[in-house]
Amino acid sequence: CSLAMIHAIEVVNNSTLLSSLGIRLGYKIHDTCSDVTTALRATEDLMQREMECYSTTNFFNMSDCIQPTTAVIGAYHSETSIAVARDLNLQEIPQISYASSADILSDKSRFPGFFRTVPSDMHQTSAMVKLLKENKWTWVGVITTDGDYGRSALDSFMSQAFLAGICLAFKEVLPDSVSDSPKLQSAVSRTVRTLNFNTKVKVVVSFAKPEHMRLLFQELSFPRLWVASDNWSTSEDVIDPGELNQNTRVIGFSFESRDVTPFKEFLKNLEFNSEAQANNSFLKDFYSNNKPQAVEKLINTIDAGTIFSIQMAVSAVAQAVAKQCSARDCTVPGSLQPWEVKPCYQNITSKCSDSCRPGQFKKTDEGQHTCCYSCIDCPENQFSNGTDMDECHRCNAHSEWSDPGSSKCELKTLEYFDWNDVFAVILLTLAAVGIVVVFLVSLLFLSHRDSPVVKAAGGPLCQLILLSLVGSFVSSVFFVGKPTDAQCKVRQVLYGLSFTLCVSCILVKSLKILLAFQVKLELLKSLRRLYKPYLIICFCMLVQGANHTWWLILFSPHKRSIINNSTILEECDEGSYVAFGVVMGFIALLALVCFIFAFKGRKLPQKYNEAKFITFGMLVYLMAWVLFIPVYVTTAGKYLPAVEMAVILISNYSILCCHFFPKCYAILFRSMSNTRDDFMRNVYEYSKKSTRGLGDFSLPDASKSKESPYVISNIPCFFPKRTESEQSLEPTAPNDQCKYAL
């Protein structure tokens, strides 16, 4: 231990910690001989030299006085440290022990100046009890010494063993002194008899000193398992390793140690009659008695744990002195008092690497000490919630996430097209306005159901179209909110059937216009027999219903959760994009047919321009859905439903604006043109002009009338060539020769 102390002091003296301040640590070593009286005599010597300095020296000339003892390192045994600590407290000299582990020394009210670089026995006895309990060794014996260390360890062990359900077959207390041979030999013999009597006790816990255990092993013959405390677990003086394997087994507890290779090199470089030997009487005696194998014996007796604890104690003293001397001149003896450095020992940092904060883990490089490591940030989706963690913990992949270097996991944000979203509010407002407008238009058409404008627009078909628009507007609402399986199914089915009904009704109107103005005369009668409006509508609805049924049975839309790094996206999975395309494609096909039929009738007279509005409405619808395809394919995230919802609203408003708003304008603001006579006169004038081109069955463009832009949408009569007698009846020709469903 003395050589380890010298080596540690030389290391700190050569470091920049003290050399930059121009100071060095000195030392005076006393051997306690494991005896309290000897230790107290040495303590008095250290304290007396300091008192003599202050009693004989002029305070204005301190050069003749040596520096008072700044700190005392030691002793090894707890009972010795307890006795020394009481004396040192009188002059507030701090004491740092490298091996005393008695729990009583943790009492700062009794030992305010005592510090240590080893843990309390409370931790050691707790580990012993856990070992016994884990192996179900519930019938054990205990051997200890009659000193502060032995009594403290025994009391701590007994209290914890009782709580763990472990019973003590016996407890033997050996005298603390190792020099009183007759008394010690008598106690050892008594202990041996106790062990031989309790043959069922296979496990013995011992807090004795190495000297005591050596005497016991010399007399014992019955093999047992020994649980050794740090007091003797690593001592090779107890028993020869070869003999130990034959007679008994030992499970020992010791303090954590580190690599002591630098100290071994220090021993190898020691020379006979060197300065170190001259200042160290212990080393001088050792060399004189063991010249041939001196260095080898020194290296073989190294206790790495004790050496490491001594190095930490010396380092603590050096850091405390450096902290106090950084702001003053400590080169003058007496300028630094021992009580000034005592507070510094409470916040000593002696680490190879700083502690890793939460959010990091320790990574030790190959070939490095375990206490020398790098602090690495935890990777993404991992965390550490403590300091100096050896590894990071993973977050729950389904519900949690974390950034690199996180100390905790965060819950993933649930994302969907929420009701409170700004875009959702805008689209829902447009849907609500659309529903209100549809109901107002429906009421207006019902109140004027007998007017020529309403009849020309289709009469009952208008109410059917308006009803389908209500369903289409309502379907858009199901695209908002947290999706469910039912919601995913309803929104597509409701829109598909509603808009199919709407386009089917418009198709019937387009077909009527085509039959009225763009078909050859010989085909007119046969085509009129095939023209069944409601059968056509029912057929289109049945086809679309079959498409939806096939879709729902085989590839039903459903809710799905897409787990991203920090979010969980809730959305509807359409099940099959082929089925989705078939449903939408059928509606687009009907719209395209409507567009073609209406486009052929675009040159109708000014009051019969229904085809123009159908053409424009279907063109807007087709353009909206053509643009929808690339946008829908390239869009991802919670706003994907908003894309389809916006296209649905555009489609609905195109029907409202192109088919119904002009007629509402005529009903409300052009009432003079909304009469039966005005429509009959307009049709008659157009028919009169068109009869001139019956030879090629082509209707010429009618002259535009400024009276009204609306015309009757029913099939007009094709007039034959007029005779002279018929010309005289020309004013009444429309009522006599044709029937108009006004």
Image (cartoon, grey):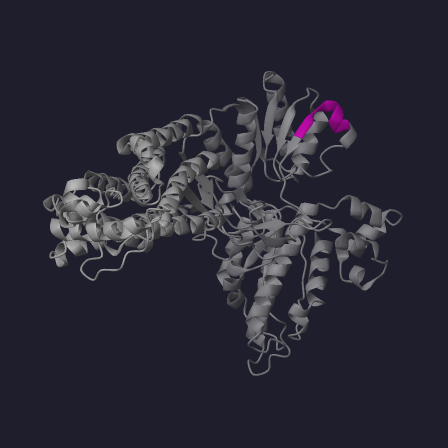
Give the residue drawn at x 56%, y 73%: 54
Viewer-side residue, 57 vs 152: 152
User: Quick check: can you spot residue 96?
Assistant: yes
Residue closest to the far bottom? 60
* Residue 254 falls left or right of residue 478: right
The answer to whether residue 559 is above or below residue 369 is: above
Which percent across, then down, holds residue 124?
Answer: 55, 38
The answer to whether residue 334 is above or below residue 717 is: below
Residue 246: say if magenta.
yes
Give the residue drawn at x 41%, y 25%: 553
Give the residue drawn at x 61%, y 71%: 67
Question: The C terminus lies in which quarter of the figure?
Answer: top left
Residue closest to the far front? 724
What is the total number of numbered labels drawn onto the structure image?
Answer: 0
Residue 515: say if magenta.
no
Viewer-side residue, 475 vs 150: 475
* Residue 547 falls left or right of residue 257: left
Looking at the rendering, the stretch of residues picked out in magenta corresponds to 243-250
Viewer-side residue, 344 vs 622: 622
Which percent across, then down, holds residue 562?
Answer: 46, 41
Q: Main secondary structure of the magenta part?
A: helix
User: Quick check: can you spot residue 653?
Assistant: no
Give the residue drawn at x 62%, y 57%: 353
Q: Quadrant of residue 546?
A: top left
Which percent across, then down, holds residue 724?
Answer: 20, 48
Which percent across, then down, holds residue 542?
Answer: 34, 28
* Residue 731 falls left or right of residue 571: left
